[in-house]
């Protein structure tokens, strides 16, 4: 299994859309994918037609055992989605209480890594949708992943959010055996606006090695896919947004073949 996390400490940058779009394209290629919703808002869970406010069981259950994960529990929590090759480990609003519970509890930062270890032979990829907040849930996402995708909306304030995310990653890397490779993905790009054009230039100038040279455009078909509860490629495989995500996936697959220097 390959584990990708999609994270940014700023909300509204396209994390959930990116997670589901990439998962959908992997599934379309015949890969078995588990998508993990670690955001208490449950956007990914809602996307696939489940209500995070009323779910009886969710990824929250994984954190109730003092850092250990009972054998078989992750598999029991999986739910079907619109694509037969994608399974969902859903979120619930109860995840929001973890930050208050976590002080004094050791081992909570590796719960998702331990959970995915139990699913290792059942899936080819795991894609984790992380909350826009540095805390135990984001730490879990980063600790479990082998590759990080950082969506960044092409507007001025998002650049500051990216700086915070890069600083967080540097902190996390100090406790990892190997630095976590990451790709910055410009999102919600609108070439008609100076804000988008200027921000894209800044991102490319400031992070020339880490930024993906393409961008995800503003595309109403992505929103339409969300409303229909299907992956973007299921909804319209030839839309501008999906074509951009296809190019991004090709970039990420090539990047994972490059040996990383610790």
Image (cartoon, rainbow, N blue to C red):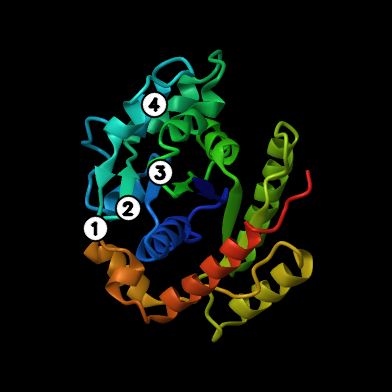
Helix, strand or loop at label 1? It is loop
Q: Nearer the viewer, residue 225 or 238?
A: 238
Contact between marks 4 and 3 (CB within 8 A): the answer is: no
User: Mark 1 sits on what residue?
Assistant: 82
Total marks in image: 4
Q: Position of residue 24 (x, y in %)?
A: 37, 62
Which callout, 1 or 4, points at the residue further toward the start of the chain?
A: 4
Depth order, front residue of 113/60: 113
* Vertical arrangement, residue 36 with respect to residue 140, above or below: below
Give the Cα distance between marks 4 and 3: 12 Å
Find numbered disc 3 in the image and state the secondary structure of the residue it sits on: strand
Disc 1 and disc 3 in contact, CB within 8 angstroms: no
* Disc sitting over residue 36 in the figure: 3
- Residue 157 showing in the rendered view: no
How many other residues sit within 10 Å of disc 1, few (<14), some (14-19) or many (≥20)?
some
- Residue at image mark 2: 86
């Amino acid at each position: 299994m390959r584990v990708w996390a999609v994270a940014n400490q700023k909300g509204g940058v396209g994390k959930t859309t990116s997670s589901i779009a990439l998962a959908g394209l992997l599934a379309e290629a015949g890969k078995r994918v588990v998508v993990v919703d670690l955001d208490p808002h449950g956007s990914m869970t809602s996307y696939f037609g489940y209500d995070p406010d009323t779910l009886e069981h969710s990824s929250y259950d994984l954190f109730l055992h003092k850092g250990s994960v009972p054998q078989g529990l992750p598999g029991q929590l999986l739910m079907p989605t619109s694509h037969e090759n994608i399974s969902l480990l859903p979120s619930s609003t109860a995840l929001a209480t973890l930050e208050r519970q976590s002080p004094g509890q050791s081992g909570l930062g590796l719960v998702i890594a331990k959970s995915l270890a139990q699913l290792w032979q059942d899936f080819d990829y795991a894609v984790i949708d992380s909350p826009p907040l540095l805390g135990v849930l984001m730490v879990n996402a980063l600790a479990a992943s082998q590759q990080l995708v950082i969506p960044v909306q092409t507007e001025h304030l998002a650049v500051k959010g990216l700086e915070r995310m890069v600083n967080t990653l540097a902190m996390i890397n100090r406790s990892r055996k190997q630095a976590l490779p990451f790709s910055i993905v410009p999102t919600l790009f609108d070439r008609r606006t100076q804000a988008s054009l200027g921000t894209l230039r800044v991102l490319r100038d400031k992070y020339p090695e880490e930024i993906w040279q393409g961008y995800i455009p503003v595309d109403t078909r992505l929103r339409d896919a969300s409303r229909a509860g299907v992956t973007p490629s299921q909804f319209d495989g030839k839309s501008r947004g999906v074509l951009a995500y296809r190019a991004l996936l090709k970039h990420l697959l090539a990047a994972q073949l490059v040996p990383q220097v610790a």
